[in-house]
Image: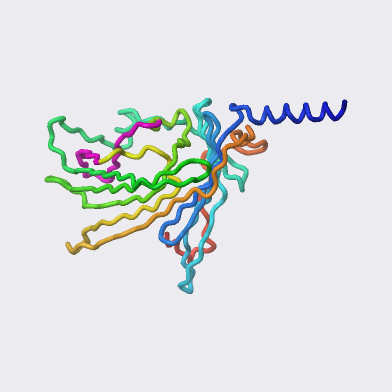
């Protein structure tokens, strides 16, 4: 009788752990840029998300050598159900909070900060073409229990008449799966949909037009190699070419039940205005190099 009760309880626990409401995603992402790698841990469950990472930069010592400094472990918890985001310094036991998603500034708030949004006439000519070419190579392989497709995307930034931008080309060679690791309030396009985005900096605004060649990829990239090429003008009027390479790889992906406490503020943590996210310099003579 006791043996039957044991197996009954074990079966009930198994059913509880498989409850879709308790299941989530655990993911570790490694990014490598200019020879330096960093990792980010990601937990998702319903309308809640937690990321863990550490900031790092190189410090030049007085003798001319460079050492890498690593900051505290930072956890960011996004709670759509509460409309809040919490930043936790897990080393100091402190946390900060704010609205989530972040609220856009009102016109009065923008004016108070000296920010003036660009005003364009609908009939004004475009000054920048963003041309994106997507090619599905037809190659497939299994990654983390999903069928991944090999897609190469080339994005060209082409200045038109009146543009202040520089030409640029970015090629992303990636493997994608049908997984969408976002939470409900983040406003990402749903599966099968595609949207354009372009970020401008400084005071010189562009009026972009978007041209898509091929079917845009809407899946989640688990292995990506991004190579960017461009040029910029120096103070003396000459031009200099630039090239960068960034690798992003999911090295862990599991779908399993998650502990609800992952998305809560730990007992004893103290609320502060701002948490420290960056590593500390060892001495005043050292200079950060990146």
Q: Nearer the viewer, residue 10 or 87?
A: 10
- Residue range of the region highlighted in magenta in the rendering: 191-213
**Percent from the top left, x then y, of residue 53?**
53, 48
Tell me residue 73's x, y (percent): 57, 48
Is residue 193 rendered magenta in the image? yes
Q: Position of residue 243 (x, y in %)?
A: 31, 59
The one of 115 and 2 positioned closer to us in this rendering = 2
Is 49 situated above or below 91? above
- Residue beneath the point at 48% across and 57% down: 37
In the displayed structure, would residue 177 be above or below residue 237?
Answer: above
Magenta highlight: main SS: loop
Question: At 67% from the left edge and 38% from the top edge, which residue is drawn?
Answer: 268
Q: Quadrant of the C terminus?
A: bottom left
In the rendered view, does 104 fall on the left or right side of 272? left
Judging depth in this view, the residue of 121 and 171 nearest the camera is: 171
Quadrant in the picture for the N terminus: top right
Does residue 120 show up magenta in the picture?
Answer: no
Tell me what residue is drawn at x 51 percent, y 51 percent: 39
């Amino acid at each position: 009788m006791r043996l039957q009760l044991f197996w009954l309880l074990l079966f009930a626990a198994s059913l509880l752990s498989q409850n879709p409401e308790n299941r989530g995603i655990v993911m570790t992402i490694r990014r490598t840029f200019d020879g330096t790698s960093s990792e980010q841990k990601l937990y998702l469950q319903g309308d809640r998300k937690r990321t863990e990472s550490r900031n790092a930069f190189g410090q030049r010592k007085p003798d001319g050598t460079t050492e890498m400094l690593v900051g505290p472990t930072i956890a960011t918890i996004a709670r759509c159900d509460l409309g809040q985001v919490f930043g936790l310094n897990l080393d100091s036991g402190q946390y900060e909070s704010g609205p989530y998603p972040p609220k856009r500034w009102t016109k009065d708030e923008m004016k108070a900060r000296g920010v003036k949004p660009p005003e364009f006439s609908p009939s004004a000519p475009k000054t920048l073409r963003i041309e994106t070419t997507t090619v599905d190579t037809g190659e497939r392989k299994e990654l983390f229990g999903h069928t991944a497709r090999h897609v190469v995307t080339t994005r060209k930034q082409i200045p038109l008449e009146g543009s202040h931008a520089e030409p640029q080309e970015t090629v992303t060679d990636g493997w994608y799966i049908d997984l969408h690791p976002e939470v409900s309030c983040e406003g990402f396009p749903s599966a099968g949909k595609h949207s354009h985005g372009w970020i401008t900096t400084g005071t010189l605004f562009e009026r972009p037009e978007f041209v898509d060649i091929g079917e845009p990829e809407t899946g989640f990239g688990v292995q990506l190699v991004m190579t960017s090429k461009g040029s910029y003008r120096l103070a003396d009027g000459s031009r200099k070419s630039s090239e960068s390479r960034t690798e992003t790889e999911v090295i862990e992906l599991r779908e399993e039940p998650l502990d609800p406490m992952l998305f809560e503020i730990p007992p004893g943590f103290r609320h502060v205005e701002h948490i420290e996210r960056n590593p500390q310099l060892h001495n005043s003579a050292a200079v950060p190099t990146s």
